[in-house]
Image: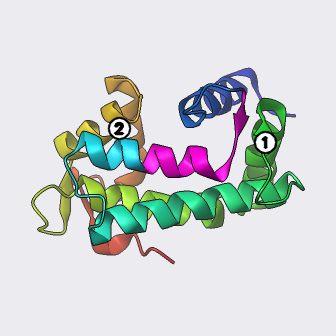
Amino acid sequence: MITDPVRAEYEHRFAMYDTDGDGYLTAQDFTDRARLLTDAVGEPADSPKARALGAGMRHTFEQLAALAQVDATGRLNREQFVAAFARAGTSGTLGQVVGPSIAATVALADADGDGVVSREDFAVVHLAAGYSAAQAAEAFTALDQDGDGRLLVEAWPAE
């Protein structure tokens, strides 16, 4: 059983990923979300960063669909999404499910391409993604494992 705060977070994610607002998630919702993020930071749609984010998002959807025992060409409702995320968390596979999309999001946040993501650059992407400033700060702190106030793109391999 998942706690109420964790459920609320997963339901929030579901709402953000449901780009067409139909109450279901499909691979297209994840593709559209990647496009929304790249557009928000002015990244060209055909750039390596945009392609990596699209691939990472598709991977996440496919993994969640498999955990929900839904065909990758199908769709997930909110309960299936929440259960799949919870299953990934309890089975220790959450990193495999979201790792490529996290790596691509960190790379997208590297606005100047120097391999380092500042707290501010990270916040720009997360605010565009629909998170609050507090949620962006919390996510950055969780990813900043050494506490130096920066994320190294190379520390987040895409595979």
Question: Compared to 64, does 10 lie above or below?
Answer: above
Residue drawn at (73%, 54%) of the image: 64
Q: Main secondary structure of the magenta part?
A: helix
- Viewer-closest of 125 and 145: 125
**Disc 1 marks which residue?**
76
Element assignment for label 1? strand
Helix, strand or loop at mark 2:
helix
- Nearest to N terminus: mark 2 or mark 1: 1
Rendered residue at 72%/62% (across/down): 63
Q: Position of residue 158 (x, y in %)?
A: 45, 74
Count residues near mark 1 (Cα–Cα under 10 Å), then give few for <14, some for 14-19, many for 20+.
many
Residue at 50 percent across and 67 percent down: it is 55
Q: Nearer the viewer, mark 2 or mark 1?
A: 1
Q: Amino acid at mark 1?
A: Leu
Which residue is identified by label 2? 126
User: Percent position (x, y) of residue 76?
Assistant: 78, 42
Q: Which residue is pictured at 32% across the width and 31% down the height?
A: 127
Stretch of the chain drawn in magenta: 23-34
Left or right: 83, with 12 as reference point: right
Residue 99, how many percent across, how many down?
53, 64
Q: Sort mark 2 into few (<14), some (14-19) or many (20+) by Cα contacts within 10 Å.
A: many
